[in-house]
Image (spheres, rainbow, N blue to C red):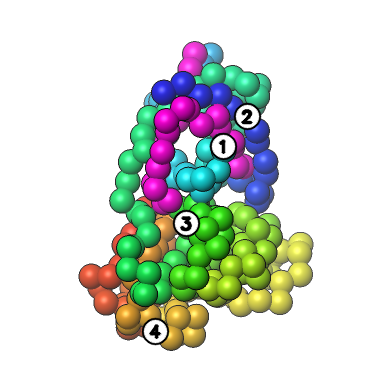
Amino acid sequence: MKSKLLARVEVAERTVAVELEKPPGFTFTAGQALELKLIGLKETDSEGDSRAFSIASAPADERLRIATRLRDTAFKRALKTLPLGTAVELDGPFGSMTLHKNAAKTAVFVAGGIGITPFMSMLRQAAAEQSTRSFVLVTCNRRPEDAPFLEELQSLSRSLKGLRLLETMTQADTSSRPWAGRRGRVTPELIAEAAPGVSEAICYAAGPPKMVAAMREALIGAGADEDSIRTEDFPGY
């Protein structure tokens, strides 16, 4: 499918959100992903000219949005510098990291870094629908500067009545910004505090592979049913 780069916005240090033209007829379920291919690059490397990204926008939004950490690869350098309006190609949607259908069950989201993107899609859609479902979101980043969509998430926690947000920083002491919130990694105790009913909830974890493995163990340690945990790794983000 043909698309275009429409906008770029920095959402954290070394992290950019990219807005794409939504092709006619492109539909997806919140939490799904797409593949973005950059066309006619003058520079390439062994990682190629396409990448898979979770969609961060709500299905009802007019534009598609993705977000990524900026690494020193040919693809990421091009994504950062290509002129707005540049033609690109999309494939998808794909993926099963989508919200469960039983609205009576709380959704517990645990996100590390850029792993927040599928949950942004779900929460933006919930806000658009004025959903009354219950959500718990636990995010873990090094510093406030590294936390994608930090201000928007805090705004959503105020406007979306069913959302409880708990943010923790592992290296807050190195931040140039004041941080009065939680510090440290995601632990079973933190999960249990944020989601006392986690044993009855459907749980989701997304982020770098090692972090996802640790978050899954924290969920289990807090009492989550292993069969209720859905995970998605973001390798090499």
Tag 2 or tag 1, which sits nearer the N-term?
2
- Sequence-wise, the earlier of marks 3 and 2 is 2
Query: Which is in the foreground here, disc 4 or disc 1?
Result: 1
Q: Is 31 on the left-hand or right-hand side of 12?
A: left
Disc number at residue 6? 2
CA separation in Å, label 3 and label 4 = 20 Å
Which residue was labeled with disc 1?
63
Q: Amino acid at mark 2?
A: Leu
Q: Is residue 18 above or below residue 172?
A: above
Q: Which residues are magenta?
A: 16-40
Q: For residue 220: magenta?
A: no
Q: Residue at x 39, y 84 (%)?
A: 197
Left or right: 156 as drawn, with respect to 95: right
Residue 227 location (% of width, % of height): 23, 70
The amino acid sitting under disc 4 is Gly
Q: Tags 4 and 1 in contact by the CB under 8 Å rule?
A: no
Q: Taking 148 as reference, is 4 above or below it?
A: above
Q: Residue 134 location, x and y as percent?
A: 47, 73
Which of the two residues, 196 or 134, is positioned nearer the viewer here?
Answer: 134
Mark 2: secondary structure:
strand
The reply to whether residue 73 is visible in this rendering is no
Identify the mark nearer the N-term, 3 or 1.
1
Which residue is the site of mark 3? 122
In this figure, which residue is indicated by the disc labeled 4?
Answer: 197
